[in-house]
């Protein structure tokens, strides 16, 4: 095996490692990625896995979470310059960033948001939470956008605002689902002014005390998140046709979490709601045929090469 072959094998193993992380920790997200074309799928897995690893430094810390995250971040930024890493997650991310020409500032902003989680325990207003989400969610949408691609004649800048809105919608959905878990880690991602308006305190969240005040707060937050999904929706037709059903499936599944929160009467302080496996599979099956048809249409629309035309 040549050195080049060895590197290709190492890169393929790195992407498989990222896919395994996505399958274990992001079941809905991973299922939706199966609707992507095979060439796009590994890059999305790499982006997810890198975000997961960085997040774990904060949510499941060792003795020195700040140092661990800083060391990992410095290594990653240096490896983006050299084009290689011995760490499988960072290797896949470096390759993805360079292959799709993803702007470096998106990664810098994401790492800054993860670092802020080590010291910031709450957000006074929705505007403050939005500023945090620029690095933790908006740039995730912007990272994924080059991988998904845009429709012919559509500039990436045209689709970007909708990608940002979808990243925020997904993150806000997670915040509402994970209120109980987050407060156990010392963090609250519900705006303090909205909490105060409904008479809900951090102490109530920490004590897992559910009442009608918390129910009304969650009802208002669900409405806010649904508006983000509405802002994102016009962006799906701007994407490459063969990527649209992945985004539609992910939106259906994450939007389904909001529905499950409502069905649970907003009781998320002492439990974690989720979309059932049959529901996830039903969404996947419904989108699968459409995704396959889109691939066929794209293939047929491509101009034939000279050799194939004369065959």
Image (tube, helix red, strand yellow):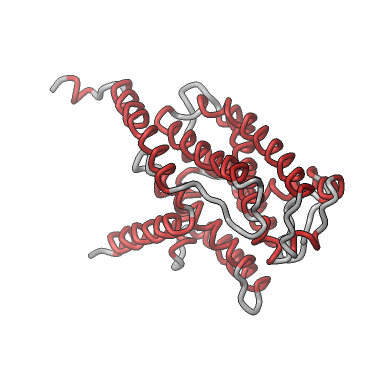
Q: Is residue 42 left or right of residue 257?
A: left
Q: Is residue 204 left or right of residue 76?
A: right
Where is 111 relative to 169, above or below? Answer: below
Where is 149 relative to 13, above or below? Answer: above
Place of residue 46 in the rendered image (x, y in percent of width and height, measured from the top left): 46, 53
Comparing 139 with 288, the one in front is 288
Place of residue 159 in the rendered image (x, y in percent of width and height, measured from the top left): 58, 30
Comparing 185 with 268, the one in front is 268
Q: Is residue 30 left or right of residue 159?
A: left
Q: Residue at x 67, y 50 (%)?
A: 135
Which picture quadrant has residue 208?
A: bottom right
Q: Quadrant of the C terminus?
A: top left
Q: Residue at x 56, y 52 (%)?
A: 273
Place of residue 93 in the rendered image (x, y in percent of width and height, measured from the top left): 49, 55
Q: Quadrant of the N terminus?
A: bottom left
The answer to whether one can see residue 32 in this image is no
Q: Residue at x 45, y 52 (%)?
A: 27
Place of residue 165 in the rendered image (x, y in percent of width and height, measured from the top left): 64, 36
- Give the farthest residue toward the bottom: 63
Comparing 6 with 87, the one in front is 87
């Amino acid at each position: 095996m040549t050195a080049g072959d060895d590197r290709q094998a190492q890169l393929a193993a790195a992407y498989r490692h990222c896919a395994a992380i996505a399958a274990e920790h992001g079941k809905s997200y991973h299922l939706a990625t199966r609707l992507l074309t095979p060439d796009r799928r590994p890059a999305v897995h790499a982006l997810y896995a890198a975000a997961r690893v960085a997040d774990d430094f904060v949510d499941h810390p060792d003795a020195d979470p700040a140092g661990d995250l800083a060391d990992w971040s410095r290594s990653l930024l240096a490896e983006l310059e050299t084009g290689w890493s011995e760490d499988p997650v960072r290797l896949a991310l470096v390759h993805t960033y360079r292959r799709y020409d993803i702007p470096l500032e998106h990664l810098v902003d994401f790492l800054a948001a993860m670092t802020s989680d080590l010291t910031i325990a709450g957000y006074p207003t929705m505007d403050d939470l939005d500023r945090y989400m620029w690095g933790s969610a908006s740039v995730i949408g912007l990272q994924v956008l080059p991988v998904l691609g845009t429709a012919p004649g559509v500039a990436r800048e045209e689709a970007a605002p909708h990608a940002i809105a979808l990243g925020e919608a997904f993150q806000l959905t997670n915040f509402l689902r994970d209120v109980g878990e987050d407060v156990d880690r010392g963090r609250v991602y519900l705006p303090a002014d909205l909490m105060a308006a409904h008479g809900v305190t951090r102490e109530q969240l920490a004590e897992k005390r559910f009442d009608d005040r918390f129910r009304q707060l969650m009802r208002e937050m669900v409405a806010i998140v649904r508006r983000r999904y509405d802002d994102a929706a016009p962006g799906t037709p701007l994407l490459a046709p063969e990527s649209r059903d992945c985004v539609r499936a992910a939106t259906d599944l994450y939007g389904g979490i909001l529905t499950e929160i409502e069905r649970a009467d907003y009781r998320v302080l002492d439990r974690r709601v989720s979309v059932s496996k049959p529901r996830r599979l039903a969404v996947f099956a419904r989108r699968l045929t459409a995704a396959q048809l889109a691939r066929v249409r794209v293939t047929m629309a491509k101009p034939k090469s000279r050799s194939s035309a004369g065959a």
